[in-house]
Amino acid sequence: MDFLGAGSSQLSALSAQERELLAIGTFEGSLVLGGQHRVSSGDRDVLVARLTPEGALRWLRHWGGPGDDLGDALVARADGSIFVVGGFSAGALFEGTPLPNDGGYDCFVAKLAGDTGHPLWVRRFGGTGDAICRSVAVDGAGDVFVTGFFNGQVDLGQGRQSSAGGSDTFLVKLSGQEGVPQWARVFGGPGDDIGRNVAVGATGTVFLTGHFSSDVEPSVGAIDFGTGPVRSTGDSDAFLAAFAGDGRTLWARALGGPNYDMAKAVVPAADGSLYLTGLFQRDVPQQPGQSRFLSGGFEGFVGRYTASGEELWQRRFPTLLSGHSIALTSGGALAMVGHFTSSLEINAGKTLQAEGPSDVVALIFNDFGEIQRGWRLGGPGADYGYSVASAPWGIVVGGIREEASSSHGFLAHLPWP
């Protein structure tokens, strides 16, 4: 299913609710979906759609302002409520609720009614620089956890806080009923420290992942989550941290080597273990004046860790540029989506061939890291898989297809098991 129009579009995140699918992303210009036509207010606008198992549109919402507006993540609860997060750059209007803008990008958190998509409440976090919300999770009591990053100063509902260096990570808890901030924590050092994903386990433990670095000397980069400094061993390292529901830090770990490493998603399993995906960078030649990130050589990974962050197993794929998103299926298998170049060997004698410069890949892993099934999606252009969700009818992946003159978001249903 393609999200088409005169401009461009992208799907950033998916979530299943009551056998139906919810999707969030952005679009620019015009968009036509399920017979409904939308026009963005400025540059990109936020879009949220609810779809039936057959792909029919249940409802479509969009919000924005005269600037650039981002829909980054959403999570759906069994009670029908939906929480969405993202950013906006020049003020935005959420169906009658105006959101002012302080600096560059500001962050929004909104609760939507599941049956209509109508906003029940909207909260904004902003300051003198940029503040972007990247991920949202909900605990068993219905309270909301949001992570992202900011630079300069930001007000997260607990007064102004300043970044220690470039960009700092934040973690905020809000009441699910009214959206009132309960507590906010900020973590950072002299470099860029980015919160990418937050998840809540069955016992209420909150897990946070992302990456951190130093702008002075990569090997001395450090970030303190409240249990002492966690140090980088390279240009950028991934981090994994755990918190109690009241915000207390339980533990924190760095993951990575001497180069550029990043964790993009964390999912708690029923037994308390954790799954991660992201990328590591192998040793590659670096041109004078070139940043290590632009040197390439990335290997996407999927790993499983204990409830305290100890590695159980890890799978790396040299041509998988990144693992972007993971989700547990109803049977306990792990679904991962990302994108790869050239060819990708997923099992002995089983290789996926890319048709374009990059293709989408979706993989199913068992408890021991063995691949049970793999799919390739793509055409002659560059295709990227950004999100995966488990639904009663299988798994669904979403992302973006790039063509000669435009790019557009897509959804694909993959039967499993």
Image (cartoon, grey):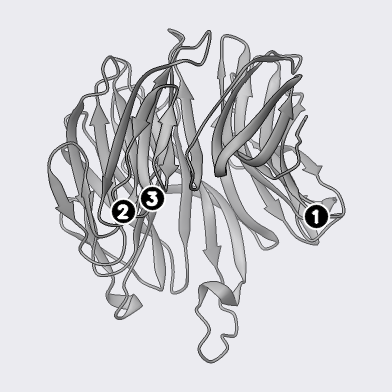
Q: Are marks 2 and 3 in contact (CB under 8 Å)?
A: yes
Question: In the image, what residue type sits under mark 2?
Answer: Gly
Quadrant where the N terminus sits is: top right
In the image, what residue occupies the spot 79% across and 61% down?
357
In the image, what residue occupies the spot 24% across and 31% down?
173
Q: Which residue is mark 3?
A: 105
Question: In the image, what residue type sits under mark 1?
Answer: Ser
Question: In the image, what residue type sits under mark 3?
Answer: Tyr
In this rendered view, identify the residue nearer to me: 394 or 134.
134
Q: Which residue is mark 2?
A: 103
Label 2 and label 3: CA atoms lie apart by 6 Å
Q: Earlier in the sequence, mark 3 or mark 1?
A: 3
* Relative image position of residue 285 (x, y in whole percent): 60, 85
In the image, what residue occupies the spot 45% across and 29% down?
269
Label 1 sits on a secondary structure element that is loop
Q: Which residue is mark 1?
A: 405
In the image, 417: left or right of 59? Answer: right
